[in-house]
Amino acid sequence: MSNRKQTSEERKTIVVIGADDHNLALIAAIPEAKHWDIQRVLEWEDVQPDHGRIDFDDLYRTAREKIDALDGGADAIIGYLDFPVTSLVALLTRDYGLPGASPEAVASCEHKYWMREIEAKVFPDTAPEFAALNPFASKNSRHAVPAYPFWLKPVKAHSSVLGFMIEEDDDLDRALHACRQKLHYFGEPFNDFLAHLEEPGGSAEVGGNYAVAEELVSARRQFTLEGYVWQGDVTIYGVVDSIRVGEHKSSFSRYQYPARVPDHILEESKTMTAKLLDAFGYDGSPFNIEFFWNPDTDALRILEVNPRISKSHSPLFKMVDGVSHHKVAIDLSLGRKPEMPHREGKDEIAAKFMWRSVEADGIVKRVPTDAEIADLQKLLPDLDLAILVEKEQQLSSMFYQDSYSYELAVIFLGGDSEEMLEDAYQMCIDCLPIHLKPLPETA
């Protein structure tokens, strides 16, 4: 069905799935936004609930009801969050006859086992060894996993939830125990999405409640290409450095734009991206794809593909290029080739810093006050931050966290140099105290 408006002269109705004030403000700052009516359909809290429980079909039904109730319907449907938003957008654009990647192509990106299956066919020499693992199966079923060490992660999750470095049998037992407790939070709603596909993109027997064991692909450097596919052609409009910390270098400490990656590596990564997305049948939508790069050997390995813009990178594009790349998603859904400005922002470089705790667990005893934040903003007027914890909150109660750290705050900063960014971030840490009371580790 289609309920699109038929004349280009009318204002365009842009539906945002999983809306929040911060990202809507970035959209509103795009010059063309004066011609758009932005409609919030589902809120951030609906699609990323603190308790982690997602009823996919209820969200899908509610989104359709809200879109059907719009006067004149939707001209574009976008999202900037991971699952379930990516999957909802794919189904809704199909339902309403709007441009966008097919649900099957989106599933090929989202389903981590299917993605590796396709990658292995396209790049048999560089794809990692991998295996599907049913956490509820007997120990005898584990014989197919890669040799230690390897990385274990769910078929579908995000923010590195339930991702584990596996170096020995005991690590695997603990990781599978954790998966059995929480895997269904993503697995069940992901299965609901897969049920809406016209045909599976990979092994149909590997559902959402599986984990994937992968040979390690990590290297010293990691970067992300932000791009889109328009009528079969891949365009890359930005490259972002991803800097990791922690025991296994598995926790992001900051995203920095623009990335410092040599031209020959960018060209090779673009070529690999185009081949893989073509194999997915992915077209008419934005994406970001994460690579590991070994500067000593120039080896490139693909980590994952996300069928969306990165919300984390959006303020960085605004600071450096002049507008957020929400513009790319909207242009594509309106059926036109995006035009992103380049280096027209106020800053030479920008970063998203992720302030983390590596305590096993703890209780938040103090968070920055509004007055402390206001005082800091007098020194750093462009400071954009969000404190993610509350006083007396137990860190382990936070749902969307990786397996080795807790994210306390996010801080966006722009400036003239990397040194300036790091100095400003250190000032934030010094002036905005967050006090934690550590808890003893449980056996």
Image: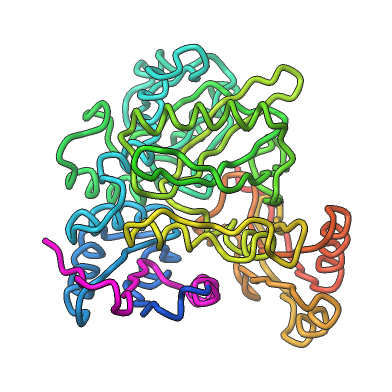
Instruction: Report whether 226 appears left or right of 37.
Output: right
Residue range in magenta is: 1-30
**Above or below — where is 57 with respect to 213?**
below
Give percent across and percent down for residue 61: 18, 65
Residue 419 location, quadrant: bottom right
Which quarter of the figure has residue 12?
Answer: bottom left
Q: Is residue 411 visible?
A: no
Q: Residue at x 81, y 75 (%)?
A: 380
How far across and how far down the image is residue 328, in percent? 46, 57
Q: Residue 357 in the image: x percent, y percent?
A: 71, 55
Name the residue at the bottom extreme.
Answer: 371
Q: Residue furthest left?
A: 1
Say whether residue 26 is magenta.
yes
Q: Quadrant of residue 105?
A: top left
- In this rendering, does residue 10 appear at all? yes
Residue ID at (31%, 75%): 13
Q: Is residue 221 above or below residue 243?
A: above
Name the quadrant of the N terminus. bottom left
Q: Nearer the viewer, residue 434 or 15?
A: 15
> Does 313 sit left or right of 400 as displayed?
right
Q: What residue is shown at x 42% (from left), y 69% (from top)?
A: 44
- Whether residue 9 is in magenta: the answer is yes
Q: Position of residue 47 (x, y in %)?
A: 37, 64
Q: Examine the rendered structure and indicate whether residue 341 appears above or below residue 33.
A: above
